[in-house]
Image (cartoon, helix red, strand yellow):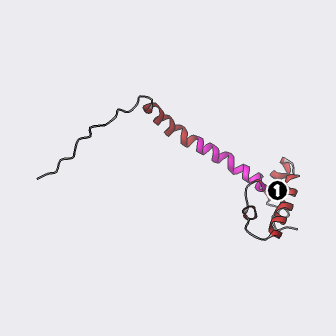
Amino acid sequence: MQHQGTPVKNQQKTPFWMWMVLPVTTILGPIILIALAIFSLPYFWLYPERHAHLPDFGEGTPDDAARLARWRGRCARLTFFQRVGLAWRGSRRFRIGAA
């Protein structure tokens, strides 16, 4: 004997606007995420001091936090073109551990 499923009695109709939202979100969602990724990669490449590092979360020693503050101070004085040059060359002078 086969078991028959019970019929659904309180099945609601899908609202008409839901059929418009689904295609828009499936098309625009990935496009927006790709655009954010394209923007964020050069941003963090040019402005490495603006994102969080471990001493910001209380990890490390007070000396690490002071060194990070000095490094951020040096980076904050750079112009846009100096940042591009340093990011392109990968200068070791502006690394966090540099004196």
The quadrant of the picture occupied by the C terminus is bottom right
The 10 Å Cα crowd at callout 1, few under 14, some 14 to 19, many 20 or more, is: some
Residue 90 higher or lower than 18, as above or below: below
5 shown above or below 60:
above
Q: How many marks?
A: 1
- Residue 28 % position (x, y): 54, 37
Q: Residue at x 68, y 48 (%)?
A: 40
Outermost residue toward the front in this view: 10
Residue 47 locus on image (x, y percent): 77, 52
Left or right: 25, with 56 as reference point: left
Identify the residue shown where x is 63% and y is 48%: 37
The amino acid pointed to by label 1 is Leu
Magenta span: 32-49
Residue 33 in view? yes
Between residue 14 and residue 78, name the one nearer to us: 14
Task: Determine the secondary structure under disc 1.
Answer: helix
